[in-house]
Image (tube, grey):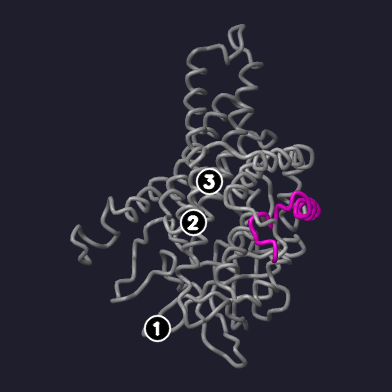
Amino acid sequence: MDPALTQEQEEIARALRDVLAKQAGPEEVRRAAVSPSGYDVELWRRLAKQPGLAGLALPERHGGSGLGPVELALACEEAGRVLLPSPLLASSVLAAGAIAAGGTEDQRDEVLPLLASGAGTAALALPGTPALALGLVPDANPRVLPGDVPAGGGRAGGIQARPADDGLWTLYGEAAYVLDGARADLLVVAAHAGGFPRSRTVLFAVDAAGSPGLRRERSAGIDQTRSVGRVQLRDVSARPLGDPALDAAPVLAGVGRAAAVAVAAEAVGAAAQALARTVDYVQVREQFGRPVGSFQAVRHRLADIYVAVETARSAMLYAAWSATAAPDDPVPALLALAHALTAARATAAEAIQLHGGIAITWEHDAHLYFKRAAADELLFGPPHLLRARAAELSGVLAPTGTDAGGATR
């Protein structure tokens, strides 16, 4: 791997940073987060056109820019730097990734251009938390039937699917932790089908605007800049993405790897910005007649945080690069996410400590970074479980529920 970014990659990151610095400041972010849509719709559409944020990693034939995982990671890093409320993660990474990998060619031609242009958004409805459903953390209750394959690391039992007429299926159940689930135009739903003999996960497309029996509501979460919704389906008609006879577990596993890199990039950007603001503040805050930043203990603490952030960024970029070089290996993405979430939590905590009492007030931005770090751990897995999953997949530890010899306990 060449660790140096290309000129084009640096220009993509710089251009997006300049735009967000002008149009997504702290006050704009706060207003967008509490708006009915949960994000600035006009800003998202402008970013979708220039620099093409919504379809950055989608193929050009589907209206995207045709760039790769590294460019997408750099964009997510800049979005995380300002805590941008947007459909970037939910629509452009999770849902678009599932459609691109699991849908038919006609379905990709129909849906992906709308997502790439910013004219429409999508959300991926999964059973349980994304961390478990996408296989980012170990499953405490794995299926142990002979030949059975976990659906992205967890059983898709939250929503059940049964065949109906004219190639349609009927969905019944609910998903509680759907990123942008309350506002997306299209839902990609992971449902359990086949019953006991042919148990599998199937992906379905649900039109959020015209589906009787569909109920959605935005949940009250720790982090207002990341919208999470509850989706309930009561005999909702849906069309399968791809072949419904096939298990969508490999598709969800691939989406999980992409999501891990994207969330890691956002966490790195948030940590870097929180660190930069803290460094600026300790140079002007005085105590005992001198700037707080002149004390050796404070310098050591900030130096430790700087090392943690830069290490996490290196791991994130390697994971983005390996998504192309070794797409079937999820370990780099899991370790990058673990490092990034650890750095984000530590940086946000130090920011609050070094800013003093003002950092815990609603008016200050430091607590927003702390809430983002805490919410990401709840949604995408605490670092120790991410590392445990990486160790399990790499063969360092025996899989959950088995002994060293591979026998089921």
Three-letter residue code for mark 3: Ala
In space, the residues marked 3 and 1 are separated at their CA atoms by 35 Å
Q: Secondary structure at mark 2?
A: helix
In space, the residues marked 2 and 3 are separated at their CA atoms by 11 Å
Q: At 60% from the left edge and 59% from the top edge, which residue is drawn?
A: 179
| 349, 80: nearer the viewer | 80
- Where the C terminus falls, by quadrant? bottom left
In the displayed structure image, the side of residue 160 where residue 107 appears, left or right: right
Q: Cβ–Cβ below 8 Å for labels 3 and 1? A: no
Q: Up-down: is 39 above or below 354?
A: below
Residue 57 covered by magenta stretch? yes
Three-letter residue code for mark 1: Arg
Q: Secondary structure at mark 3?
A: helix
Residue 322 point in image, percent of width and height? 48, 50
Label number found at residue 101: none
Label number found at residue 198: 1
In space, the residues marked 2 and 1 are separated at their CA atoms by 26 Å
In the displayed structure image, the side of residue 171 where residue 148 appears, left or right: left
Q: Bounds of the magenta span?
A: 42-61
Q: Which of disc 3 and disc 2 is earlier in sequence?
A: 2
User: Which of the two discs, 2 and 1, sits closer to the camera?
Assistant: 2
Q: Cβ–Cβ below 8 Å for labels 2 and 3? A: no
Residue 146 point in image, percent of width and height? 28, 76
Task: Residue under label 2, please give it.
Answer: 257
Residue 340 point in image, percent of width and height? 50, 41
How packed mark 2 is, by other alpha carbons closer than 10 Å (few <14, some 14-19, many 20 or more), is many
- Check the image and name the residue furthest to the bottom: 165
Task: Residue under label 3, please give it.
Answer: 264
How packed mark 3 is, by other alpha carbons closer than 10 Å (few <14, some 14-19, many 20 or more), is many
